[in-house]
């Protein structure tokens, strides 16, 4: 007899293959243009200065950054000082479709993973309000995504996120802990040199 239940989180929605190949390729071209204007930067952990294994950029009016002083949203790129490029229409349309009640997204964090990069278990809680969901899009190599509960000690489950997949963390899952355990190299040909891009759309300020 197995008596340990799995507490499925309400508010976590998983849309496998939301974007087909053509839409992934078109979105990737837009992300490449964004990164040409707002180059990937190397975030470091607050206090310790330890580098993340992922590189980042952003688009939209605000961008998420992490440096020695802390985590925050800011309107300009930390290295170039220029405003972040505009968010692609495909992403604002995704938001409107999956979060029709929420005010428009203000930040899209672009995470780039080389094989071997990971993302520790975390909550997305640097926003001023948690009514709106966080919506993520995966492009490139498949990753193992781990998700738990609002307490760090809650049990976790993991599932794979492939290119074109979308995840919504809203409702009771908005503050769920989650992270990326590993990237499965060679699982996608979307990115010529391999690796994975994850885009997370957020509403930052109270509407
Ligand atoms: C990633 N994702 O997939 C990391 N956050 O690379 C996230 O941190 C994330 O997938 C909030 C909502 C959905 C996510
Ligand atoms: Fe996150």
Image (cartoon, rainbow, N blue to C red):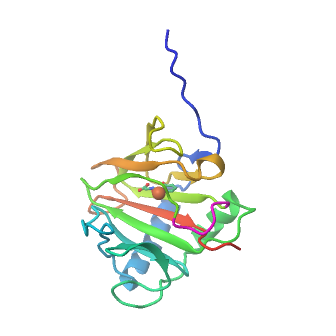
Instruction: Determine the residue positioned at 54% across, 56% down.
Output: 19
Give the main secondary structure, helix, strand or loop, of the magenta stretch. loop
Residue closest to the eye, 135 or 37: 135
Highlighted magenta segment, given as a residue range: 126-131
| Quarter-of-image position of residue 133 | bottom right
Place of residue 185 in the rendered image (x, y in percent of width and height, measured from the top left): 27, 49
Q: Which residue lies furthest to the front in this view?
A: 47
Q: Does the magenta stretch include residue 200?
A: no
- Please identify the residue farthest to the top as the structure is shown: 1
For this rendering, which residue is in front, 17 or 102? 102
Instruction: Give the number of callouts.
Output: 0
Q: Where is residue 172? Give x, y as percent.
A: 63, 47
Position of 127 with respect to 177 (left or right) is: right
Q: Identify the residue at the far right of this view.
A: 101
Instruction: Give above or below for 116 relative to 110.
Output: above
Above-or-below relation of 119 to 63: above
Residue located 42% across and 80% down the image: 33
> Horizontal placement of 101 versus 119: left or right?
right
Coordinates of residue 148 in the picture (x, y in percent): 48, 41
**In percent of the image, x 71 and y 74: which residue is there?**
207
Q: Indicate the position of residue 72 as horizontal and vertical percent values.
A: 46, 74
Queried whether the magenta region covers residue 127, the answer comes back as: yes
């Amino acid at each position: 007899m197995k008596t340990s239940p799995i507490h499925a989180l309400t508010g976590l929605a998983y849309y496998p293959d939301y974007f087909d190949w053509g839409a992934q390729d078109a979105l990737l071209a837009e992300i490449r243009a964004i990164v040409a204007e707002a180059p990937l930067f190397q975030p470091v952990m607050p206090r310790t200065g330890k580098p993340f294994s992922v590189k980042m950029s952003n688009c939209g009016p605000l961008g998420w950054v992490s440096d020695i002083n802390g985590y925050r949203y800011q309107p300009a790129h930390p290295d170039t000082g220029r405003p972040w490029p505009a968010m692609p229409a495909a992403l604002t349309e995704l938001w409107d479709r999956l979060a029709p009640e929420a005010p428009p997204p203000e930040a899209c964090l672009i995470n780039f993973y080389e094989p071997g990069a990971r993302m520790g278990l975390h909550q997305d809680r640097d926003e001023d309000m948690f009514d709106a969901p966080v919506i993520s899009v995966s492009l490139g190599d498949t990753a193992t995504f781990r998700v738990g509960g609002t307490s760090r000690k809650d049990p976790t489950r993991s599932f794979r996120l492939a290119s074109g997949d979308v995840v919504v963390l809203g409702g009771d899952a908005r503050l769920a802990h989650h992270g990326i355990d590993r990237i499965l190299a060679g699982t996608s040909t979307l990115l010529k040199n391999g690796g994975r891009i994850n885009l997370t759309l957020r509403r930052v300020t109270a509407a």
